[in-house]
Image: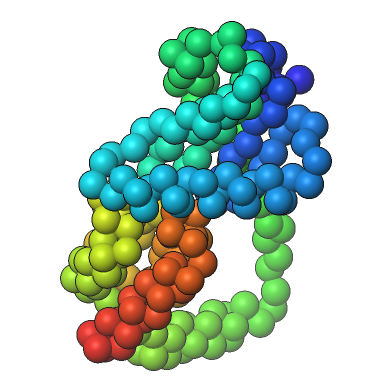
Amino acid sequence: MSIIENMMNEIGSSVSFYIGRKKLIFGGVENPDDFLESISLVLSQAIDALKDVAIREIVIDGDEKYILLILKGREIFGFLLPKSKDKEDVLRVFHSKEEEILEEIFPKKKPEVKEVKIEETRKVEEKVEEKVEAKKEVEEKLYSGDILNVILDVAKETLGDFATEIFENIVQDLNIEKENIKKDKIMELVNELEKSAKMIVGPTKSANMRDDILQKIKEVE
């Protein structure tokens, strides 16, 4: 039994879900995609209504059950719970297992073992590779750390108080350096920001934010 299933048994949750870098749902629920979209919509409306308030948990109350949403930067964890289950007990259990849950959702990749072959033309190939790499270094566009501030400023206009924490988490996840940043890393950052924003402000505003960021990047180039 997985860490998440063990926790669900411990807190009495019939359904749990994760919305963030991917969407996952555990437990029996009809039309899981529709369920997750509905939760995202409710969350977006709540955040729009309380723009200036830092939200850590949201409770969606029902007659016999309630949904507890736990916001951790750009990560959203949710649990469907009986009314008899105390929210603070659930939070205590969740925080004690949070690291293990994330490791289960995002398992670390095992390093690939590559076979080393010695070829007669190795010296020639190495010289060719050196020339190719040298050419790539000349052609590849590198950005200074200032570009990160430019992107963050645009994100703040859309995400408000959530922007900084979401931004810093993505930068850390992507291992982005503060100087000499490659363009492909910048595009990964923009893509991940748009995905996170979509969960909070919806697809239209997140797409507009992406366009604004790309326009600012062009102005810097």
Q: Residue at x 32, y 85 (%)?
A: 215
Q: Residue at x 68, y 60 (%)?
A: 116
Q: Looking at the image, can residue 124 be seen? A: yes
Residue 201, horizontal then vertical, whole percent: 43, 59
Q: Quadrant of residue 25?
A: top right
Viewer-closest of 195 and 181: 195
Q: Is residue 160 left or right of residue 45?
A: left
Q: Looking at the image, can residue 172 be seen? A: no
Q: Is residue 120 left or right of residue 220?
A: right
Q: Quadrant of the N terminus?
A: top right
- Total residue callouts: 0
Q: Note whether 152 is above or below 60 in the view shown.
A: below
Q: Residue at x 62, y 77 (%)?
A: 122
Q: Quadrant of the C terminus?
A: bottom left
Q: Residue at x 66, y 82 (%)?
A: 121
Q: Note whether 146 is above or below 106 in the view shown.
A: below
Q: Quadrant of residue 82?
A: top right
Viewer-closest of 141 and 173: 173
Residue 89, horizontal then vertical, whole percent: 48, 10
